[in-house]
Image: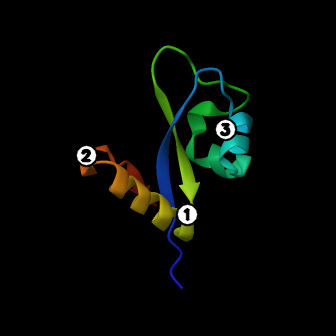
């Protein structure tokens, strides 16, 4: 079986750290840190502009999430990275 990992861009709030984001998204902190090296070592999301983190999702999550985004928005707004 082919294992497909998808990285989905997720907007985050100023002041959040990796632990908060991982908890809110039910994602392993180490996995989240692997794809968001700018937010390591206790750093928090700055307030100077809008930031996103890359959230790894599994096959089932990816299919459901991508399908939902495709139905809810235009192609131009869909931000999904295949890894």
Residue placed most toward the observer, 40 or 57: 57
Residue labelled with disc 1 = 61
Specify which label sits upstream in the sequence, 3 or 1. 3
Q: Secondary structure at mark 1?
A: helix
Q: In this picture, is 79 found above or below 44?
A: below
Residue named by callout 2: 76
Residue 41 picture location, percent across and down: 72, 31
Whether 3 is drawn above or below 53: the answer is: below
Instruction: For the N terminus, give its image quadrant.
Output: bottom right
Q: CA distance from mark 2 to mark 3?
A: 25 Å
Q: Name the residue located 52 percent from the left edge and 64 percent from the top edge.
A: 5
Secondary element at image label 2: helix
Q: How many neighbours does mark 2 have within 10 angstroms: few (below 14), some (14-19), or many (20 or more)? A: few
Q: Earlier in the sequence, mark 2 or mark 1?
A: 1
Q: Which mark is residue 21?
A: 3
Q: Residue furthest front?
A: 72
- Crowd around label 3: few <14 · some 14–19 · many ≥20 (10 Å): some
């Amino acid at each position: 079986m082919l294992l497909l990992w998808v990285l989905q861009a997720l907007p985050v709030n100023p002041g959040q750290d990796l632990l908060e984001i991982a908890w809110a998204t039910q994602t392993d902190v180490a996995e989240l840190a692997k794809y968001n090296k700018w937010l390591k070592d206790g750093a928090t999301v700055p307030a100077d502009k809008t930031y996103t983190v890359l959230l790894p999702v599994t096959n089932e999550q990816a299919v459901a999430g991508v399908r939902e985004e495709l139905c809810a928005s235009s192609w131009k707004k869909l931000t999904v990275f295949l890894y």
